[in-house]
Image (cartoon, rainbow, N blue to C red):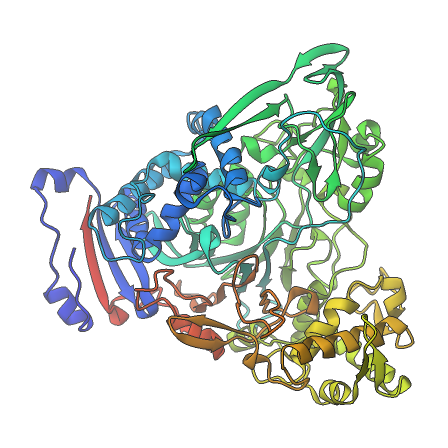
Amino acid sequence: MGHTRKGLAAALAGLSVLALAPAARAAGPETTIRYTEFGVPHIKARDLRGAGFGQGYAQARDHLCVIGEGMASLAGERSRWFGPDGRPSGTIVRASSNLSSDLYFRGIADAGTVERLMAQPAPLGPSADVRDLVRGYAAGYNKYLAERHRTSCAGAPWLRPMTEVDVYRRAYAWGMALGQSAAPDFLATGPSAGTATAGTDRMAGPGSNAIALGRDATVSGRGISIANPHLPWGGDYLWHQSHVTVPGKLDVIGASFVGLPTIALGHTARMAWSGTITDGVTPFTLFELTLANPTTYLVDGQEEAMTRRDVTVDTPAGPVTRTQWWTRYGPVVTNVRGNALPWTATTAYALADPNAGNLRLLNSLAAVNRAQSTGEYIAAVRRTQGVSIFNMTVTDSRGDTAYSGMSVVPNVTDAHAERCGTALSRTLFPTQGLAVLDGSRAECAWGTDRDAIQPGTFGPGNLPLQWRSDYVSNSNQSYWLGNAAAPMTPTHRILGTAATERNVRTRDTLTEITDQLRAGKFTPRAAMDLTLSNRVYAAELAVPGTLEMCAAVGHKATDSVGRVVDLTAACAALSQWDRKSDVDSRGALLFTRYWSRVRTIPSGQLWRTPFAVDSPVATPNTLAADNPALAVALADAVSDLAGAGIAPDAALGANQYVDRGGKRFPIGGGRPELGVFNVITSAWDAKRGYTDVGGAGSNSSSYLHVVALTGDGCPEAKTVMAYSQSSDPLSPHHNDQTDLFSRKEWVTERFCDVDRHTVDVVRVHG
């Protein structure tokens, strides 16, 4: 491996090559990695195995410790290395402890689930391209590991070489992030007491905004893609930016999930795409089991025994064994999304997740990484059917755009849910989209479409797809309203709600798009301005009514613990606030605390003008200023700030920031419930404010791109990685882009002019 940092000429002239025997060099992949500004690698290889090798090496250089820890998590080894009681922050599982996470993943490993899926031929198993990429990726990671570079986790006992199974485990876990992987704490160990009850807990998860602008919406008449995913700033959810080229076969740039070799968001020469998590979709169902005895259930009157799995996890204090119970449908669980599901003498509940049989995510990403048009992208998704839990927005150089909701979803039509739904389903299916099907009847198993690769899932022909020449968008809600002028036709409830009130972030996205189109068509600059506008749409709706309330109560109110609070300064701050969440916005912090209470008021009591299906972006509106809960909420917000020593008109950036590498970076943006496109979340510190942006349990803007397609195959793109390219504190690229993000600045992407901007060259051989 050789490095220089004296410009391209010196880099090429002085390039040193890792000394290998000629036979070894010929046998393994050979990859050249050119680095441009801010540590972005441009990987060039002669085949896909070499491309994967370069990806593995480059990702290890920036995220060796994160990927290594993730491998330990996915192997069910967190308790062994980090203790059973620690919380697995930043992992692709919603577990309350390392032990809970380990029991889940160790159970999958013991069952050989991933290996069994790997062994299947394509299209159900990995494609030949994916096998080459994964083989190379693992080798590239191991190459960097073997070179023993200085890293923050050097010498850690859990740091080990990667296998191909490790890569597939990660892809598999991503597929179930909203299903099985969201319920590891509730894998049943045996019967319990209680009654099944519907809950109100809709767990907040990763979010995103994605926009694809078409020829009718841009000055150029060509497509512009906007990517703004909201994910944690650490752990397995991290992105890594790269450019991968195999001459004549592949030329793609964008962001990959760490630990995987494919680009998940980005562009090729003539097509660009972005995506969001399918939070509006319910990607699993429950089956209600009728029990013959505690571990035997009935199907069409025949007894069927549950499968007992005794899962053992190593801990520093010795092995811990727990029992899991599995059925033909999936594991027996006791709670999902806050819904209590006790295992009684007569009834139990099994969670059925189609992504438990899906290892096709990498197949889909590898295929779309080659697409050169919106049509080719959609064809690739239709062919591979592996986009597990993602919506996609796509555009191309001709200005064709599409929204794709073609994810992996149980084939449960509304008619099926009506025919097979239990009493609990009649509550949960309309409200949560969660079907609870009668597991005692074989006819209640999921249906299968003729065009579906995987039995039990909807085929592409029955999943949402919208083509437009102006724009499509998604902000994590359902397919229904991605274009303000063209709501999609309602379909099955499991695919999301339709013709219902949208949340404030969806309304903000659509309002910002339509406001710009009224002013003029989009340029790349206008798209960048929208992405970081930090416009607080909830404030535009609610501040006028709040000021009306201030006057009505004489600028005085009693907070929720009985203290009389003077609202004069708070009302003045809201009156003078620019209604943005920029770092210098004064009043934004106060409104955030206020709105955290106000948003819990039922819509019918909060707004004077209710939701109207024929005006879904503009309604509901006009705050009900006479609702006494508003004054209490504002008084509580003032008390919050006073307790932290923060003035009502404090600048947002003084109390919303992140400390990295000994530096403090004020961060603009706001929480999703505020209707801010640039989502920034952090836990409230009662003494300091929002002082850990991107910390444990938070989801914030991460990798952002604005890609303007051109006619010459050289898109003009701006990107920024909010938390920077490297998670290693020892790297020079650990916080450099965080500084840019703090100042609303962007990185100019190098797709066609790599050589001119190369600052470092690495050549590696396997």
Q: Nearer the viewer, residue 486 or 766?
A: 766
Asked whether residue 261 appears in the rendered view, the answer is no
Asked whether the viewer can see residue 270, the reply is yes
Q: Position of residue 485 (x, y in %)?
A: 75, 63
Return the x and y of residue 659 as percentages of the image width and height. 45, 72
Q: Residue furthest front?
A: 317
Residue displayed at 40% across by 41% down: 72
Q: Position of residue 377 (x, y in %)?
A: 51, 49
For residue 297, above or below residue 204: above
**Quarter of the image with the N terminus in it:** bottom left
Which residue is depicted at the point 74% across and 59% down?
486
Residue 693 screen position, x and y as percent? 53, 67
On screen, residue 143 above or below 594 = above
Q: Residue at x 86, y 68 (%)?
A: 606
- Name the image quarter holding residue 505: bottom right
Quarter of the image for residue 149 reads: bottom left
Question: Which one is in front, 461 or 711?
Answer: 461
**Going 64% across and 85% down the picture, which residue do you hit?**
586
